[in-house]
Amino acid sequence: MTIHCIAVDDEPVALEMIAAYIAKTRFLKLVGKCASAVTALNFLNEHPEVQLVFLDIRMADLNGLEFAGMIDQGDNRRSVRIVFTTAFDQYALDGHKLAALDYLLKPFSFADFTRAANRAREYFTLLEQDHERQYLHVYANYQQVRIDTAQIRYVESMADYIKIYLEDQPKPLKTLMTLKVAEQKLPASHFVRLHRSFIVAIDKVTAVSKTSVQVGRVAIPVSEPYREAFGNFMKSWRQPGS
């Protein structure tokens, strides 16, 4: 496996160091070096083969967190994953909320870089293996976890993390991720967001009313901003035999 990646950092020394580390890692291929997030955005649009971004956070004009949020919003960029590189550890929580693969605190060694690169390789290997099925990959319990989306009943937002409720699992899986990121990762043909705090698996809905949907014994409320999504859901949803 070869992972196509770019390095983004406004410090020339740091940028060259990351590029050198990439060159020393046999399964990574450096596609480009960018001295700003704005340049990196344009580069991604021109190079759809890029899969992984080693990204500094504190940069002028557009910082790394803003950059990560922007590329997460584009359908064609959902396959791009990020490893944050920064000298400021206070950004670690924000990095995990944006579903970064890893977070490297400067100054980091080649050994630290290698651990992050190996985590990326594990992620993309699983992604290749899952080509025929749809899975959600999250970081939970200090490890990468692969979830069969067919087993997801609904997802609930709890401020800085989400709870993923699964079939035949008494307790939900907790992971540090925003509901917005989860919504982007889940297939829109099988999931619908009906509330600022909930995403529901369409085929797990057992009953509906004007203000809520039923998933098993749980009633999921429908909020006003998602009325249009609820209307589209109602058009396609039918009770068996109707």
Image (tube, helix red, strand yellow):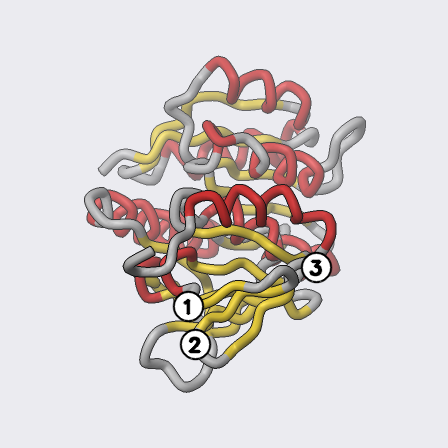
Question: Tag 1, which secondary structure?
Answer: loop
**Neighbours of disc 1 within 10 Å: few (<14), some (14-19), many (20+):** some
Pick the residue in front: 152 or 99.
152
Residue extending farthest to the top is 46
Q: Is residue 171 above or below residue 76?
A: below
Do callouts 2 and 3 mark residues in contact (Cβ within 8 Å)? no
Residue extending farthest to the front is 242
Q: Which amino acid type corresponds to the residue marked 3 in the rendered image?
A: Asp
Q: Is residue 96 above or below residue 129?
A: below
Can you identify the residue that label 3 sits on?
89
Distance in Å between CA atoms under marks 1 and 2: 7 Å
What number is the disc on residue 223?
A: none
Can you identify the residue that label 1 sits on?
206
Q: Which amino acid type corresponds to the residue marked 1 in the rendered image?
A: Thr
**Neighbours of disc 2 within 10 Å: few (<14), some (14-19), many (20+):** few
Judged left or right of residue 22, residue 160 is: right
